[in-house]
Image (cartoon, rainbow, N blue to C red):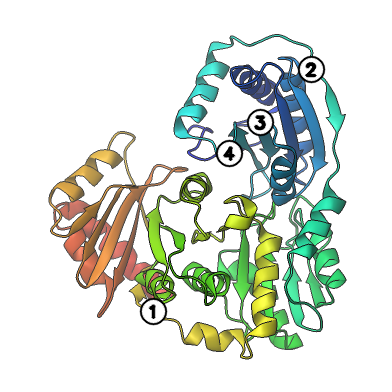
Amino acid sequence: MSVYKACDIRGRYPGELDEGFYGLLGRAIGTLLHEMAECPRVIVGGDLRPSTVGLQAALIEGLSATGCSVCDLGRVPTPVAYFAARRFHPVGLAIVTASHNPPEYNGLKLRLGPMPITLEQMARVEETVSEGKFADGHGGVAPLSVADEYLAWACGSAKAAGGLKLVLDCGNGGFSELAPHALRWLGYDVVPLFCEPDGTYPNRSPNPSIPENVDALRQAVRETGAAFGAALDGDGDRVAIVDNQGRSLTGDQAIILLAQHVLGAQGAGEEVVCDIKCSRAVLDAVEARGSRAVLERSGHAFIKTRMIEDDARFGGELSGHFFYRELAGGDDGLYSILRVAELAQSCGEPISELVDAMPRYATSPDVRIPYGAADGPARLDQIASAADGQVLRLDGVRVAYADGWGLARCSVTEPLLTFRFEAYAGAPRAIAERLLAPVPDLREAVLARLDRLEGTH
C-alpha cells in the first residue's frame, strides 16, 4: 500500500521511504505552503528512531530549497512540537516519526495551515511529489528549543501534586527524560520503567495499547503498590493506563475515566468527541454528566479537526489519543498522565473502583479480514444497502440496533476490512450475524475469526 495514509505518512525505512524521498517531500510541502504565505515558517521535529536524523535533515533541506524559514526543534516528543506550534503559529508543522510502529518504520505527521491535515491536502502532497514541479528559493534554518518552556507549561497545568506513587513506562521513547522530570518536580513518587532514550525500543513495542506490550508495567504496579501506571508510545502523544490492581484499562475505560474527570460537575452542555469504535458505555458516561457525545471517524486528524470546529471539551480515540480544549483540540500523553494523577490524588477511592463502577457492554475485539484491492468499499456498500438498523456512513458503515451495533470499515494502513460488534444484552456474535447477513461469505469468515479471537481471551 501507499505510504500516504489518511492522517500521516508511514512506511518501512529504507525500502518504502528514504532520505531522497524526504527531500522531495520537503520541496513538495514547501511548494504548497508558498500558496498560503510568501515566506512560510515551518516548525520541524523528529522522534528518536535511528533513521530520523537523516530523514529530518533531508526534509529540512527540501523545505529550505523552496524558500521556507525552518525552525528545527531537533528530536523531541510530538507533544513538544505541538506546543511549539501553539506558541509560535507557524504556517506548517512537520514531525518525522512513525509513532507507535516498530523501529524499522518511519513517517511524517504534517500540518499545512492552522488545521490538521485533510485528505485533500495529503493527496496534493503526493501529487506534487509525483509531478516534481517545485518552488525555488533560499530559506533559512535556525534551531529552536522549547523544552523548558513546555515543562513549565505542563507543570503549571497540574491542579494537584505530591506524594502519590505511580509507575511511568516511557518505552525508551521521546518522553523518557521530560516526563519523569515533570512528575518528580510536581512531587510524585515516580517508579521509572524504560526511561532511557533509545529509538530502537529494546524493551517493548512502542505501541502500549496492546496489554501484552505492557506486562512489565502491570507487574511493577502490583509489586510497588502504585496508585496507577502509565505507558507512553514512541513519540509521546498516546498513553495507556494501568489501574492500581495492575489491570490494563481498555480504550473505552480510559476515555470514560478522563472524560468524567475533565467534565467534572460542570459538564452540562459540553461536547465530547468519541471515536466511532467507542462502546455505548462511553456515550452513557458522557451523557450522565449532562454532556453530548459525538461520534467521529477514527484517526487523530479527524478527531482533532472535529474538536476544533465544535470547540469540544474533550475527545478520545480507542488507541490512546486523548484530546483537550486546552490544547487547542490536540493530544499530549504527558498532559493526560497529569490528569489521571490529579484524579487519583483527589477522588478518594482507587482507580480500580472507578473502573469497576463504569457501565459496560459485551464488545468484540477487532476482527480483520483481507480484501482485494477494489473490493472493500463495494462490500461496505452491500452491507449498508441491506441494513435493517440506523446506518451511519461516517467511516465505513456503522449500523445501530435496539440491542447493539456493528461497524465495518476499511483499514487506512492495510488491505483489510475491520469489524467490531457490541451487544447490550447477550453476545456480540448475534450482532455480527445480523450486520453481515447480506454478505454470507464475509459473515462466515468474520464469525470464524471472531470465534478464534474470543477463544483466546
The Cα atoms of the two marked residues, 2 and 4, are separated by 27 Å
Estimate how packed mark 1 is, as few (under 14), some (14 to 19) or many (20 or more) residues with alpha carbons within 10 Å: some
Say what secondary structure mark 4 lies in.
strand
Q: Amino acid at mark 4?
A: Arg
| Label 2 sits on residue | 139
Does residue 237 appear left or right of residue 252 in this picture? right
Q: Amino acid at mark 2?
A: Gly
Q: Earlier in the sequence, mark 1 or mark 2?
A: 2
Q: Earlier in the sequence, mark 2 or mark 4?
A: 4
The disc at residue 360 is: 1
Q: Quadrant of residue 191?
A: bottom right
The Cα atoms of the two marked residues, 4 and 3, are separated by 19 Å
Q: Amino acid at mark 3?
A: Gly
Q: Quadrant of residue 105?
A: top right
Q: Quick one: quadrant of the C terminus?
A: bottom left
Estimate how packed mark 3 is, as few (under 14), some (14 to 19) or many (20 or more) residues with alpha carbons within 10 Å: many
The Cα atoms of the two marked residues, 1 and 2, are separated by 55 Å
The disc at residue 10 is: 4
Q: Residue at x 22, y 53 (%)?
A: 391
Say what secondary structure mark 3 lies in.
strand
Estimate how packed mark 2 is, as few (under 14), some (14 to 19) or many (20 or more) residues with alpha carbons within 10 Å: some
Residue 366 visible (yes or no): no
Estimate how packed mark 4 is, as few (under 14), some (14 to 19) or many (20 or more) residues with alpha carbons within 10 Å: many
Q: Quadrant of residue 67?
A: top right
Q: Residue at x 69, y 44 (%)?
A: 86
In the rendered structure, are the residues bearing label 2 and label 4 in contact, judged by CB atoms less than 8 Å apart?
no
| Label 3 sits on residue | 92
